Amino acid sequence: MNAPQSIKHAHARSWWRQALLRLTGVDAMGPARPSWIPIRKLSPRHRPKILQHLTRLSPQDRYLRFGYPANDAHIGRYVSELNFVRDEIYGVFNRRLELVAMAHLAFSIDPQWSTCAEFGVSVLLPSRGQGLGAKLFEHAVVHARNEGVHMLFIHALSENSAMLRIARHAGARVERDGSESEAYLLLPVADLDSRVNQLVNEHMSEVDYQWKAKAKQFREILQVLQEIRQGVRDARHHHPSEPEGR
């Protein structure tokens, strides 16, 4: 390999290394700094998990997420009306494939606001403190840019300090009007980096989900086998073998 080609390939390897480092926080040539969170796109088949996730929110969390005291019927209607074709709905699963965090990136249906989108997020209480809300917001920003969105809009109650803090940290302008606040974040035009970021994240998240699904299935098989073994042991204990003929 001649020198120019070697230099060209070295630059390519460096670019991909930096892209992976920005996305995952893991340097392929250095010590790991795990910061990547698998965010998976949701589809209509995930409606039951979405419903389960949202109904597990406390009354206060429902109020912060929807802006009103949503009951189970309200949440059920919201889930049934989710548009997975127009909007981007995605979430984070734990190793038991429970949806512990989810976000809804809703694109405007008004042609006059075709370059705008609204962001909403929810995280279950046991999974808070891990930065899931911020990661979901970062994911939304990348996807929105790649879809040609110029302004990301967040409507939140003024007491929803966590959401407003995420918006401010991203550089959004927050305007308060009594009990409600609105945040506006202007997005730069999509570039190669944002598109590669999305592609790599989608691929890695799908791989992560499939591994979790296989691990969950394996654990279930082991549990069944353990129950069978325990049943056999219990049967032997309660029904000992008859003594040989006297």
Image: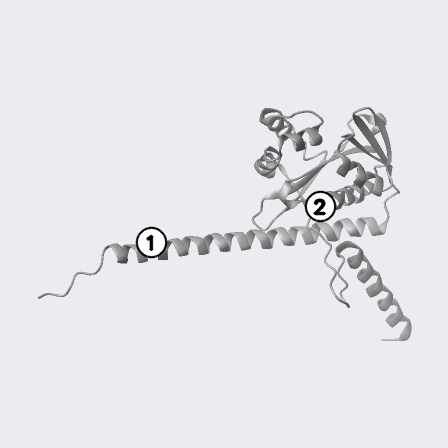
What x and y, as percent, mark residue 36? Answer: 72, 53
Residue type at numbered disc 1: Gly
Q: Quadrant of residue 163?
A: top right
Mark 1: few/some/many CA within 10 Å (<14, 14-19, 20+): few
Look at the image and tell me in which quarter the N terminus lies.
bottom right
Q: Identify whether 53 is placed above or below 30.
A: above
Label 2 Cα crowd, 10 Å radius (few <14 / some 14-19 / many 20+)? many
SS for callout 2: helix
Position of residue 103 measured from the top left corner of the image (x, y, whole percent): 70, 38
Q: Position of residue 33 (x, y in %)?
A: 74, 60
Q: Give the Cα separation between the discs numbered 2 and 1.
A: 42 Å
Which one is in front, 135 or 112?
135
Residue at the spot 80% in from the left edge and 62% down from the top edge: 17
Q: Identify the residue under disc 1.
A: 231
**Total numbered badges shown on the rendered structure:** 2
| Residue picked out by circle 2 | 132
Observer-nearest of 6 and 25: 25
- Outermost residue, left side: 246
Residue located at (61% from left, 48% from top):
94
- Circle 1 SS class: helix
Q: Is residue 87 left or right of residue 49?
A: right
Amino acid type shown at disc 2 = Leu
